[in-house]
Amino acid sequence: MLPPTDAFVATLGAGHLRAAPQLAELFARFDPDAPHDAQLAAVEKLGRFIVQGLGRLELVVVALERIPAARERFTAVLLAIARQTRAIRLLGEVGLPNERGLWAETTDRLARRFLPEAPRSHELAWLVGRIVRRRSDLAWLGPASDPLLERLAAVVPEAWQAFRPSLLDAIALIATRIAALGTGEALRSRAETAEVRASVLYAIGVAPVEELPSLIDPARRQLDHIRHALEHAGVSIDVVYSLDAIERGLARLEVLLALIAEERPEYAIRSLIATTGNGLLGLRSFTQLVADNTRLLARKVIERTGRSGEHYVTSSRREYWTMFRSAVGGGAVIVPLTAGKFLIKWGHFVPFVDAVLASAAYCGAFLVMQLLHLTLATKQPSMTAAALAGSIHARPGPHQLDELVLLIARIARSQFAAIVGNILTVVAVALLFDLSYAAITGTPFLSPTDAVATAESLDPLGSWTIVLAALTGVQLWISSLFAGWFENWIVYRRIPAAIEHHRLGRRFGAARMARMARFIEHQAAGFGGSISLGMLFGFLPQLGHFFGISLDGRHITITTTSLVLAVGSVGIDTLGSAFAWGCVGLVVIALCNFGVSFALALVVALRAREVPVDARRRIPSALLRHFLRRPLDFFVPPREPASPPPG
């Protein structure tokens, strides 16, 4: 029988006077002979007491250790609940990916939010869900809680052992699911061996519990091999889902196997509470539902980085100057593109024809650059995003940002070389074009009215330049996503192999068809990115006109060409302050183009790789420190060390 409240409080000590009387009342509710619903209510109230803070958990542990009657009541009620509830859903399903679609999950969550939910007293997940109601209820979980949780488990060993069958069932359920996903066609065709019985993922499903810990690391190595195979075989959302489900299943298996081990690590109980608690909260959250689905889509975008296309990250000075030279050639293509853009505008075509002609001009120019291996500044390929996230994901620890900062510096100086190469060329070629046009026609290419309007449209304060430059950065990012998707689609559908073995080979020759197949495979990303970017640049302004807003993008090379043509038309003196503000606008446009597209690519990559929030927050400060120490790293490559003498 429980001691009176005063004796209960005195047993716990003076330091716990405020919460001790409440705890005494809570333990008084623990009645082994009470109905099942009353026992669930008693556990729920005690659980709500604990989640208020770590000090309350310590108070409960001390009470169970010092007051035998409280320990007996607590153990008896937990044993009764273990007999009358099922824990396999809580342990083996909650917090793990399921195969239900977005629509089914959305309707279920709407129903649970607006309709009364019947109690499910036979499910332990229902009871835990009534205890953990919001994120703050898990704030007390941390390394400091590990010793208290271990003491709690040790003081009621009978109750802990009562849940052992449920732990074993959950392990069997997760292992079976891993085996089913791992031996499916989506992953089996990308594994080292196609034999089902030789797969370690299959072995997890049939191995005894004692052997499972030794199979987890080989299973992860097999997943790494499958990811490497995605580079050659392409990826689908089914593959990404299967990989994600297996990864999370292996992590849950590690926790459950640690719990049934004779010497479990301290963090095991805390990890189980955190994963199941967050999983239950996620079942009620629309935000979590959207986040989980967008994470899978992001994984699909960057899981396969692509083997071909242009290289936008330079390492050595030789590669840096190669990037600069290719950007010089790219700038020469921009001038006729900009002139064609003005000609289409002056044609006053109907909106659809205008959009088609503009898209054709953009696509044609970008495809010429692609085929001639030229570079357009600020293009951000999907492979950069995967490399950025991988540099964090692969190196946990205090120096995990070092590689990321160096990679960002390489990307920044590569883009700087591309921008400088583009701009120097467009300035020279645009002036030459304007002089040639004036010599032939007797008038400059732009009229004085168009010249002044063009310069004034670049004013970062007096126009929508900043917003439109940021919008262009979004378009550049979208085109990189489409480039990655299109290349993946080509490879996943095995289009090059189909072309190589097409019956047209009888007419054109097998060797010619093979060359065409390799050409399509190598240029797929470039074609996808060039065409999508051209369509965005051509059609989005007309869509904006339909709604009465300006969506005419601001790309650094095209706007630079326009400003040079305006200067060639009326001169710097006539433009006056408009020219000065236009030059400021060019700097702003360059920063927005690169900054927005780069930031979006990085955010998607970090989201897909589930990089911890604390690591994300440290990125700006790490970049700033490196920039203050070595600012030139973001603009020019460091000098390469001299080669050692022979011998």
Image (tube, rainbow, N blue to C red):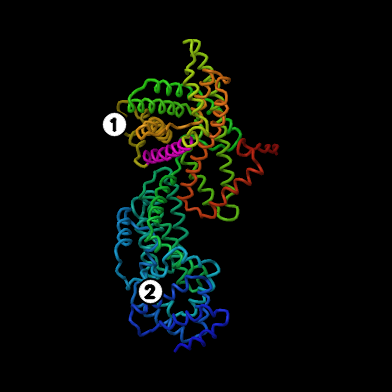
Q: Nearer the viewer, residue 592 or 86?
A: 592
Residue 601 x/y as whole percent: 48, 43
At a point 37% along the width and 76% down the height, the residue shown is: 40
Q: As rendered, which of 28 and 185 lies closer to the eye?
A: 28
Q: Residue 429, position in %: x, y?
A: 53, 20
Asked if 386 appears above or below 459 in the picture, the reply is below
Q: Amino acid at mark 1?
A: Arg
Where 186 falls versus 145 (above or below)? above
Q: Residues within 10 Å of mark 1 (few under 14, many from 20)?
A: few
Bounds of the magenta segment: 469-491
Which residue is rendered at x = 44% and y = 73% of the image? 47
Q: Three-letter amino acid code at disc 2?
A: Pro
Q: Is residue 10 above or below residue 96?
A: below
Q: Quadrant of residue 222?
A: bottom left
- Picture coordinates of residue 251, whole percent (x, y): 45, 61
Q: Earlier in the sequence, mark 2 or mark 1?
A: 2
**Residue corresponding to mark 1:** 503
Task: Judge whether residue 78 can be spotted in this image.
Answer: yes
CA gap, disc 2 and disc 1: 61 Å
- The reply to whether residue 418 is visible in this rendering is no
For the residue pair 385 and 523, the one nearer the viewer reads as 385
Front of the two marks 2 and 1: 2
How many numbered badges does the structure rendering display?
2
Residue 181 image position (x, y, % from top left) = 36, 56
Q: Secondary structure at mark 2?
A: helix
123 part of magenta stretch: no
Residue 385 placement, left or right of 292:
right
Sort mark 2 into few (<14), some (14-19) or many (20+) by Cα contacts within 10 Å: some
User: Judging from the image, what secondary structure is the residue with disc 1 in?
Assistant: loop
Please give left or right for residue 288 compared with residue 427 in the image: left
Which residue lies at the image location 39% right of the left edge and 43% below the top edge?
234
- Residue assigned mark 2: 165
